[in-house]
Amino acid sequence: MDKYTPQERAEIVTIFIENNRSIIATQRKLRQKYPNRPVPHKTTIYRLHANFRQYGTTADGPRSGRQRTSRNAENVALVRDSVAGSPETSIRRRGSQLHISARSLRRILKTDLKLFPYKIQLVQKLLPRDPDQRVEYSNAILRLSGEIEDFSSKLIMSDEAHFLLSGHVNKQNSRFWGTQNPQLIHETSLHPLKTTVWCGIHAGNIIGPYFFENDQGVGVTVTAERYQDVIRNFLMPEMEEQGLEDMWIQQDGATAHSPFNNSIIE
């Protein structure tokens, strides 16, 4: 049955009786009085009227079956105290600790306590020099766009994707239950142990991927020597095969990129 206040239930029954127990007439009257609300279904009207005649009230009659036990006042208070002490605990673990099913616990958190699972934001730690370097890079791109015709089609955007080999924070499993967003962040190391894949993209195609591996196929970290090897022995042949000339290569300020300059590929 749809959720109606006691006053709304009484009004529905009253209109139903005043209109000689006509469903059509009752729905018409309710639609005229509340044009922005859906009218109750005929089964709802019949049930409210039947409850009024049998029990003298429009409230729902007693229900058969097992009575609700998990979402009681004691468990709601128990969950409230648990969240206050450890708001980052997952539903599965909290339910195991409190001996409450995950379904009931989720309903208590959302319906009874009005809490919302906020995600932790993962951000890269910025160094003091980074803001100025970003402004300098943006100004350089704007200058080149004005000096070189169709500059955007001559730009190869490149980067490496790092697949972590050690444990890391999974944002999908990280929640903080609360009534307000706490704006949580989790700083991560810039260079964790990882295997790396390089890829480039330009206006016409994709270049790569290239996996940083040794002769045995084992992932290795990116060094200046290995990065230069990608430029000489992978990127340049790929550019020649795709017929790319007078291209600009975008790269970030990673340590392995620092020795790379125009003289390396001349």
Image (tube, rainbow, N blue to C red):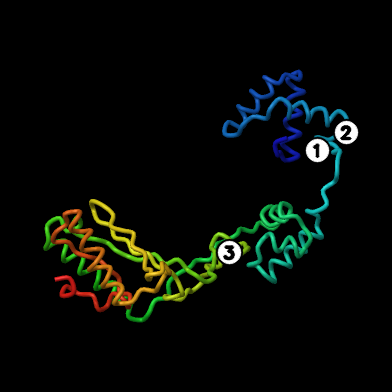
In the picture of the structure, the residue carrying the numbered disc 3 is 174
Residue kind at label 3, given as amino acid type: Ser
Along the viewing direction, whichever of 98 and 6 lies nearer the viewer: 98
In the picture of the structure, the residue carrying the numbered disc 2 is 55
Residue 196 place in picture, x, y as percent? 39, 67
Along the viewing direction, whichever of 98 and 43 lies nearer the viewer: 98
Q: Give the quadrant of the N terminus.
A: top right
In the picture of the structure, the residue carrying the numbered disc 1 is 59
Residue 86 place in picture, x, y as percent? 67, 70
Callout 3 secondary element: loop
Give the residue at the far bottom of this rendering. 128
Distance CA(mark 3)–CA(mark 1): 41 Å
Residue under the point 24% across and 61% down: 156
Q: State the mark number for residue 37.
A: none
Residue under the point 49% across and 70% down: 165
Distance CA(mark 2)–CA(mark 1): 9 Å
Residue under the point 69% across and 66% down: 83
Residue kind at label 2, given as amino acid type: Tyr
N-term mark: 3 or 2: 2
Q: Give the quadrant of the C terminus.
A: bottom left
Distance CA(mark 3)–CA(mark 2): 49 Å
Question: Mark 3: few, some, or many residues within 10 Å (few <14, many ≥20)?
Answer: some
Residue 176 in which image quadrant: bottom right
Residue 264 place in picture, x, y as percent? 18, 74
- Are the residues at dot 2 and dot 1 in contact (C-beta closer than 8 Å)? yes
